[in-house]
Amino acid sequence: QVQLRASGGDSVEAGGSLRLSCAASTYSARYHCLGWFRQAPQKGREGVATISRDGTTSYRMSVKERFTISQDYTKNILFLQMDSLKPEDTAMYYCAAARFCVAGALLSAREYDDWGQGTQVTVSS
């Protein structure tokens, strides 16, 4: 089981940017997709972005063109660059890993097998 640790969350004003990072304890060939999901207060978890082993990415419609998921394969680090942040992006963000996925398909939170502690993102208007 891989250990995942997210960081980089902060409080910013609308229109600002943040870069989330997620360090993996070890690389596992069992995981075919990595990604991010979030949970806002009193709301359910929702998938944000997914990247498959071949580098194909997919995004939630509301964050497309604003968020970018990427991975440093040599250091086992996953990133989420968030630009033009909106108050509705306020949530706890989690990085996660999935053993099975379809390249190009956004995974829902429940489709991930492992995830770490979240990092809080707060966007004020």
Image: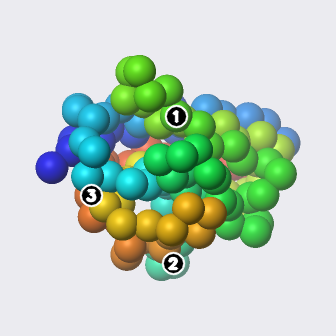
Q: CB under 8 Å between callouts 2 and 3?
A: no
Q: Nearer the viewer, residue 20 or 76?
A: 76
Question: Does 19 appear above or below 34?
Answer: above
Q: Nearer the viewer, residue 18 or 123?
A: 18
N-terminal of the pair, mark 2 or mark 3, is 2
Q: Position of residue 104 (x, y in %)?
A: 62, 63
Instruction: Check residue 114 in the rendering and tell me which mark sits there, or answer none.
Output: 3
In the image, taking residue 60 as reference, residue 115 lies left or right, namely left
In the rendered image, is residue 120 in sight? yes
**Residue at coordinates 64% horizontally, 53% vertically from top-left?**
57
Question: Does 93 appear above or below 59?
Answer: above
**Residue at coordinates 59% horizontally, 57% vertically from top-left?**
49
Amino acid type at circle 1 is: Gln
Q: CB under 8 Å between callouts 1 and 2?
A: no
Q: Residues within 10 Å of mark 3 (few under 14, many from 20)?
A: some
- Tag 1's secondary structure? strand
Q: Position of residue 55 (x, y in %)?
A: 58, 44
Which residue is label 2 attached to?
43
In the image, taking residue 106 as reference, residue 60 lies left or right, namely right
Marks 1 and 2, Cα distance to the nearest angstrom?
Answer: 28 Å
